[in-house]
């Protein structure tokens, strides 16, 4: 379902087909909020995203996409230069990481632990992000401070965009960190560092095929950061290049243009529409019965979606032979016991 159709359906539920009491901006804001709330209700399979990067020797931190909760994900694997065996760094808490910083060593001096910290607020670096809410076909360009990149694919990865930016004469390899993405799946974030650390830099602008593409400044240089930006800190620092792959639950795409498609399977869009409508009804009356009716509709569809998500099928691959799982649909407690029967006894 696209945004135009979703807004029309929400207005039909409100009984206001054209903006009057509820403005267009309010309806769009409620729709985006509903998409986020639905996305956070479960670890939905369509939101799992795989990203990769190459970290150079001497690296101590790796920034993740702002807004990604470390409590809802994180699968991490990497291979050091010269090795064939992948490593799986072990997660520790921040206090443990601080204690390990000065006394944790391995025979090869390779990091085996990591932890999350929030991005420092003082002297925050400027962060801008790019979003492609439409097709990944075609190309675009980025102009920064009067200089324009070569053409970039609308489905580009963070590495592709970084390569295009550092090719400009006014940006060096140490001046930007690019992460997130790829475009069409999630936002790509550009953090200005090096000589531009803490500086309020010009906004990037787009050229070429830019339909449904936007650039937004998240944190102005020198301003306190309002974003939760998870950081992986390696202990000790990387002594070799590290090819890393991580899987995480991305946030739903932000809807802006009418052609943008809701980041929810069609069979569950009723939940998002109901949640958005309920929020809008509260503007008229905080204890609106109509809002409660829509909340009940949201919960009904959400419960159906969770049951679908927890259905085990024969090709899921948990086991082989006589222990191969069969089609299964049960209660939440059945699902929990099926997956964690060992620890539960």
Image (cartoon, helix red, strand yellow):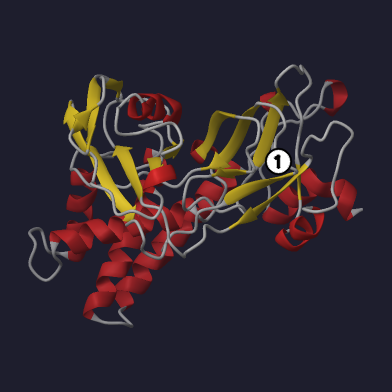
Work out which residue is located at the far front of the displayed protein and give it: 195
Along the line of sight, the residue nearer the viewer: 1 or 99: 99
Badge 1, how many Cα within 10 Å: few under 14, some, many 20+?
some
**Is residue 20 something that shows in the picture?**
yes
The image shows residue 201, relative to residue 224, as above or below, that is above
Q: Position of residue 311 (x, y in %)?
A: 63, 39
Above or below, 133 relative to 104? above
144 relative position to 270: left or right: left
Side (left or right) of 238 relative to 66: right
Which quarter of the rendered picture does the N terminus lie within? top left
Kindly state the secondary structure of the residue where label 1 is placed.
Answer: loop
Residue 143: where, in percent of width, then height?
21, 33
Does the image show residue 312? no
Residue plotted at (14% across, 59% down): 24
Query: As rendered, which of 178 and 40 lies closer to the eye?
Result: 178
Question: What is the x, y in percent for residue 305?
Answer: 51, 47
Query: Which residue sits at x=40%, y=30%?
Result: 162
In the displayed structure, 332 sits above or below 65; it is below
Residue 262, quarter of the rendered image: top left
- Tell me if 194 is positioned left or right of 80 in this view: left
Query: Where residue 314 sits in the image (x, y, percent)?
Result: 70, 26
Read off the residue under disc 1.
237
Report the front residue among 161 and 11: 161
């Amino acid at each position: 379902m696209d945004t135009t159709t979703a807004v029309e359906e929400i207005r039909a539920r409100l009984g206001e087909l054209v903006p009057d009491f509820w403005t267009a901006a309010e309806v769009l804001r409620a729709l985006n909020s509903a998409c986020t709330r639905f996305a956070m209700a479960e670890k939905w399979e369509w939101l799992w995203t795989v990203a990769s990067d190459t970290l150079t020797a001497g690296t101590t931190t790796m920034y993740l996409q702002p807004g990604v909760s470390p409590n809802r994900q994180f699968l991490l694997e990497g291979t050091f230069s010269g090795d064939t065996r992948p490593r799986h760094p072990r997660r520790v808490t921040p206090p443990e990481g601080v204690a390990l910083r000065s006394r944790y060593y391995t025979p090869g001096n390779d990091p085996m632990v990591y932890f999350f910290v929030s991005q420092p607020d003082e002297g925050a670096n400027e962060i801008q992000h790019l979003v492609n809410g439409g097709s990944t076909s075609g190309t675009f360009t980025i102009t920064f401070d009067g200089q324009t990149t070569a053409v970039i694919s609308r489905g580009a990865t963070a590495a592709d965009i970084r390569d295009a930016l550092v090719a400009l004469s006014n940006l060096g390899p140490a001046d930007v960190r690019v992460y997130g993405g790829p475009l069409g799946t999630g936002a790509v974030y550009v953090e200005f560092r090096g000589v531009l650390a803490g500086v309020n830099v010009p906004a990037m602008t787009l050229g070429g095929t830019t339909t449904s593409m936007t650039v937004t400044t998240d944190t102005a240089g020198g301003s306190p950061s309002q974003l939760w930006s998870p950081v992986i800190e390696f202990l000790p620092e990387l002594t070799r290049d590290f090819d890393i792959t991580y899987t995480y639950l991305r946030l739903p795409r932000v809807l802006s243009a009418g052609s943008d498609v809701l980041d929810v399977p069609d069979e569950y869009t009723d939940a998002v529409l109901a949640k958005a409508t309920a929020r809008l009804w509260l503007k008229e009356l905080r204890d609106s019965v109509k809002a409660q009716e829509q909340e009940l509709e949201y919960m009904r569809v959400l419960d159906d979606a969770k049951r679908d998500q927890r259905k085990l099928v024969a090709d899921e691959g948990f086991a082989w032979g006589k222990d191969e799982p069969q089609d299964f649909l049960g209660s939440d407690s059945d699902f929990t016991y099926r997956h964690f029967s060992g620890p539960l006894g």
